[in-house]
Image (spheres, rainbow, N blue to C red):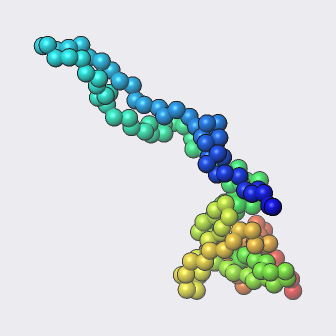
């Protein structure tokens, strides 16, 4: 004869409710003195509870990943610049995309393609290399000395 090894769920639920249930909080009731012979009646507070908006002087918390020590935060300084991103797809396939960097999130990167104006969103965790162009692609970079830095 087999024993039923599945516990009775009603016992589990009642144990959970007894152990973890918290008493329901009720708004305070206020008593007013009787007016003109009327008996005392409980009254609800007159002002409804409203959420307190955040203070303007308190800075909002920023995810540590968006700091300059992580690639997401570091890339934010290049928003508006022309870049090329190399994505690793699968185990050995690289795909590169280029465009104007428009946004960097915790787990995504957004480019506007120059040729079409389309918005491209990529997975930040697939990014392997980012090239930030100091001048338009194909145009030799003229350093501070004004000398072309291309190889002859």
Outermost residue to the left? 36
Work out whether 1 lies above or below 11: below
- Depth check, front residue: 91 or 84: 91
| Percent coordinates x, y for residue 101 in the rendering | 63, 70
| Percent coordinates x, y for residue 125 in the rendering | 75, 68
Whether residue 32 appears in this view of the structure is yes
Work out whether 121 lies above or below 37: below
Q: Residue at x 33, y 20 (%)?
A: 30
| Percent coordinates x, y for residue 132 in the rendering | 72, 71
Judge from the rendering whether residue 30 lies leftward or rightward of residue 105; answer left or right.
left
Whether residue 146 appears in this view of the structure is no
Q: In which image quadrant can residue 148 be found?
A: bottom right
| Percent coordinates x, y for residue 147 in the rendering | 79, 75
Q: Residue at x 64, y 45 (%)?
A: 11
Judge from the rendering whether residue 48 lies leftward or rightward of residue 10; answer left or right.
left
Outermost residue to the front? 1
- Depth check, front residue: 64 or 40: 40
Q: Residue at x 69, y 81 (%)?
A: 97
Work out whether 30 lies above or below 144: above
- Depth check, front residue: 100 or 65: 65
Q: Residue at x 54, y 37 (%)?
A: 58
Q: In which image quadrant can residue 141 be found?
A: bottom right
* Placement of the N terminus among the 4 image quadrants: bottom right
């Amino acid at each position: 004869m087999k024993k039923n090894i599945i516990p009775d769920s009603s016992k589990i639920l009642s144990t959970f409710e007894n152990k973890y249930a918290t008493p329901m909080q009720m708004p305070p009731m206020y008593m007013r003195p009787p007016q003109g012979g009327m008996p005392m009646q409980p009254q609800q507070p007159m002002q409804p509870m409203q959420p307190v908006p955040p203070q303007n002087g308190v800075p909002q918390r920023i995810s540590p990943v968006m700091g300059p020590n992580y690639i997401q935060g570091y890339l934010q300084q290049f928003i508006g610049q022309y870049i090329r991103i190399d994505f690793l797809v699968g185990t050995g396939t690289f795909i590169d995309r280029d465009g104007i960097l428009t946004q960097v999130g915790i787990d995504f990167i957004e480019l506007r393609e120059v040729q079409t104006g389309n918005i491209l969103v990529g997975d930040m965790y697939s990014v392997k290399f980012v090239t930030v162009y100091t001048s338009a692609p194909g145009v030799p970079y003229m350093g501070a000395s004004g000398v072309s830095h291309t190889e002859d």
